[in-house]
Amino acid sequence: MLSLPKIFRLRQRFEGPRVADVAAEVQRQLTRLELSKKLRPGQSIAITAGSRGIAQIAEILRAIAAHLKSLGGRPFLVPAMGSHGGGTADGQRQVLESYGIREAAVGCPIRSTMETVVVERAAEGFPVHIDRLAFEADHIVVCNRVKPHTCFAGDFQSGLMKMLLIGLGKCEGAKIYHRAVRDFGFDRIIRSVAPRLLARCPILAGLAVVENAYDEIALVEAVPPERFESRETGLLALAAQWLPRLPFGQVDVLLIDRIGKDISGTGLDPNVVGRKFNDHRAAEHEFPKVQRIALRSLTAASHGNAIGMGMAEFCRSQLLSETDFAATRLNGLVSGHISAAMPPLDYETDRQMLSAALETIGLAEPPDARLLWIADTLHLSEVECSAAYLADARGRADLEILTEPRDLPLDAEGNLPDPA
């Protein structure tokens, strides 16, 4: 039987600004915009709610709705998530519910449709879509997390501008925008389409959220629509600075407990694992450089969407049994990231999977391999590391060693403990 590396646990110290009272900060930020100058009593306001697992998102949406109601408005939520939720209105409502976003929790109705309105055509010739319910509202508030995108690079990645296009564009809009991106690039499509949407649609305000490396809210900022473009670049720089990271730059095998849409748009964050530009290796300028990725399971909140599994070489058979292949294929086709929907080599047990991975890393013997074991790419404050990293870890002030090296906790069947 192949010998496996011994592991030790360490804690990382990240820069971690944190908003202590998120609801109060949302209220303060929105008050700063003086929305009462534009919002009349009785008017309807659509608030975007996306498919990402943003920290305290139900509390944030409730605070937005409460502020709008205090001004006499009639807020409601619209799922703004492109093709996610299987590309159906009920599926997208279920995605919101899995994040605790229910009408009772947010204090306003949730209205879900896949119907869009074509407001005009972009200069590049394709139709510009927006959610019909949002378009018919008197106002729209765009709420989203600003974060480095899993595929796109440039001044605009994940944030208010992307939510305006791909989120509110629903399945039809997301499909055509991703097709256009392949011809023209994301930055050009954003700069082409966003001004048209801002001019033709009743955008009242944006609320940008930035998280720290501990999956906490680090910053909340209300942004007037005329400043979406100029402000988002600065917020993106902060988000990149606060992104969680692996503790070491060279990894033979990265073992990940779970992937899912609540973790990242591609199930696992390529910015964290070093595969933003190539599915199976880091670009020359990218770190970390990970030889092999092995996946154990899919989160329940992903509703069977296992997009991102194609960026790994190995997985447990359990992950495939949890996969809704129709939803995963749809996400891959609409996003254009088709390879991310392709299943890896699968094995019944963790031991079998790790043994296969460790035999493909080069001349390093398995006990000496550089193995990292993480819960997911969003929660990296504590990481299990193989003994090969011990000397490096002892010399770094940003790392705290929590245990001595010990055997991997495999049970009699060859499996590690289930993810918490």
Image: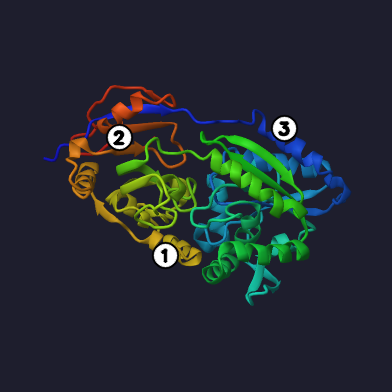
Query: In the structure shown, which secondary structural element does the residue marked by tag 2 occupy?
Result: loop
Q: Position of residue 134 (x, y in %)?
A: 71, 60
Q: Distance from label 1 to label 3 (Cα)?
A: 42 Å
Instruction: Say the numbered circle drawn on residue 223.
Output: none
Q: Amino acid at mark 2?
A: Pro
> What residue lies at 74% left-to-right and 61% top-to-bottom?
198
Q: Position of residue 120 (x, y in %)?
A: 71, 73
Asked whether 180 or 101 is in front, the reply is 180
Q: Are marks 2 and 1 in contact (CB under 8 Å)?
A: no
Instruction: Say the numbered circle drawn on residue 338.
Output: 1
Q: Earlier in the sequence, mark 3 or mark 2?
A: 3
Q: Amino acid at mark 3?
A: Ala
Q: Is residue 266 above or below residue 400?
A: below
- Horizontal relation, residue 330 to residue 169: left or right: left
Residue situated furthest bottom in the rendering: 125
Asked whether 46 or 22 is in front, the reply is 22
Which quadrant of the figure has residue 131? bottom right
Q: Are there few (<14), some (14-19), or many (20+) residues within 10 Å of tag 2? A: few
**Which of the two discs, 1 and 3, sits closer to the camera?**
1
> What residue lies at 15% left-to-right and 37% top-to-bottom?
3
- Horizontal relation, residue 395 to residue 168: left or right: left
**Which of the two discs, 3 and 2, sits closer to the camera?**
3
Instruction: Say the numbered circle drawn on residue 417.
Output: 2
Instruction: Say the numbered circle drawn on residue 24.
Output: 3
**Which of the two discs, 2 and 1, sits closer to the camera?**
1
> What residue lies at 14% left-to-right and 40% top-to-bottom?
2
